[in-house]
Image (spheres, grey):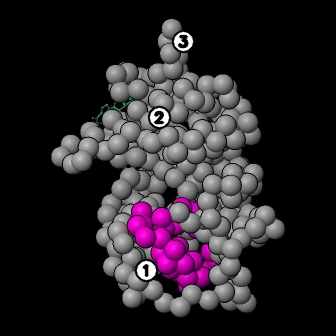
Amino acid sequence: MTVDDVPRAERVTAVGYHELDIRMNPRSWPEPELRPPDRGATWMARTTHLVSTDPGGSWVAELDGEILGVVVSFVREKLWLLASYAVVPDAQGLGLGRALLAPALDYGRGCLRGMLNASSDPRAVRRYHQAGFRLYPQMLLRGRPDRSQIPVIENVREGTESDIDLMDSLDRRTRGAAHGPDHQVLMRQLRLVVTETSSGQGYAYVDNGVVLLAASDKRTASRLLWEALASSDEVLSGHITPENSWAVDVGMAARLELHQDGFAGLRHMRPPAPYLPHGALM
Ligand SMILES: CC(C)(COP(=O)(O)OP(=O)(O)OC[C@H]1O[C@@H](n2cnc3c(N)ncnc32)[C@H](O)[C@@H]1OP(=O)(O)O)[C@@H](O)C(=O)NCCC(=O)NCCS
C-alpha cells in the first residue's frame, strides 16, 4: 500500500465496518451510518502517517485496479500493532483476509509482542486467534455523564509538545512501547490533558470521553477520566479490559451505561493498566 492508495483504502474500511455494524446489530434502528467525511479525513491522516513511518507494514488486495482489502500495521519499539483490517463485504470469507494479514505479520517478525483491537466479527477474531493473539473481552461506557456527580478535578492541565517525553515514558511503563511519532498525529486531532504531581503522572487524549489514556496509578487515571467526562456532553469511551475496572467505577459513578464491545488481542503481553488504548494506534 502506498500513500496514493489511502483514499480508496479508506472507503474499503468504511464499507467493511459499516456492513459489520449492520450484521452484528441486525435489529438496530436507525441503521448504522457509513463513516462520515470528517471521520474519513481523520482515518486518512492517520493512515498516511503510518504508511510513511512503516512503508512495509501496509498492504492492499487489488483486482482489476479495484482495492478489495486493506491491512495497516506498524512497529513501535519491538511492539507490532494492527491499525486497520478490512475486506469489502462481497469478497469476505474467501481467504483474502488471511492473504492480507500474512505480510503484515511478517513485517512484525522481529517483534515478540503484539497488540490490536478486534471487532466482534467472528472472521476477524478467528484470524487473530490463528495468528497467536490471546483475546480479552472489552467494555465500553456510553451516555451523558451526570454533572452532579463530577468531583472537583485538580492538577490537570492542557498538554503540549513538551510533554511527549513524559507520555512516551508512561507508554513504556504501561504498554511496553512508546507511541513516539504517533503523539504528533494524536495532538493534531485531539485535546490532550496531562497531570504531574508528586504522587502520580498521566495523560489522556479527549474527545467525547477518553480516546487514549496512560497513567502511573489508578487514582491518577481516574482523575483524568473524570476530566474527560467533565468536558464531554455525550460520552463514548471503549476498549476497557477488566484489568482497568477503575474506569468502570468512574463510569458507574457518572451514571453512564456499561456495554461489552470487541476484544483486545494481545501477544506475549498482559492487558496494559492503568491504560485505555486508542482504537487504531492502541
Ligand atoms: C476480518 C476480515 C478482514 C477478514 O477477511 P476475510 O477475507 O473475510 O477473511 P478470511 O476469509 O481469510 O478468513 C475468515 C475466517 O473466518 C472463518 N469464518 C467465516 N465466517 C465465519 C463465521 N460466521 N464464524 C466464524 N468463522 C467464520 C473462515 O472459515 C475463515 O477461517 P479459516 O481460514 O480458518 O477457514 C473481513 O471479514 C472484514 O472486513 N470484516 C469486517 C471488518 C472487520 O471486522 N475488520 C477487523 C477489524 S479489527
Q: CA distance from mark 1 to mark 3?
A: 49 Å
219 falls in the magenta region: yes
Q: Is residue 213 above or below residue 221?
A: above
Check residue 65 in the rendering and tell me which mark sits there, or answer none. 3
Q: Earlier in the sequence, mark 3 or mark 2?
A: 2
Could you tell me which secondary element the residue under label 2 belongs to?
helix
Residue matched to label 2:
13
Q: Image quarter for residue 108?
A: top right
Residue 249 vs residue 85: left or right?
left
Residue matched to label 1:
250
Q: Residues within 10 Å of mark 3 (few under 14, many from 20)?
A: few
- What percent of the width, then of the height, locates residue 8? 54, 26
Asked if marks 1 and 2 touch (Cβ < 8 Å), the reply is: no
Q: CA distance from mark 1 to mark 2?
A: 32 Å
Q: Who is closer to the viewer here, 184 or 181? A: 184
Q: Earlier in the sequence, mark 1 or mark 2?
A: 2
User: Is the residue at mark 2 in contact range of ligand 1, meaning its CB lies under 8 Å from it?
Assistant: yes
85 falls in the magenta region: no
User: Taking the image as drawn, is residue 98 in sight?
Assistant: no
Outermost residue to the top: 64
Could you tell me which secondary element the residue under label 1 belongs to?
helix
Which residues are the magenta region? 208-236
Amino acid residing under circle 2: Thr
Q: Who is closer to the viewer here, 57 or 34? A: 34
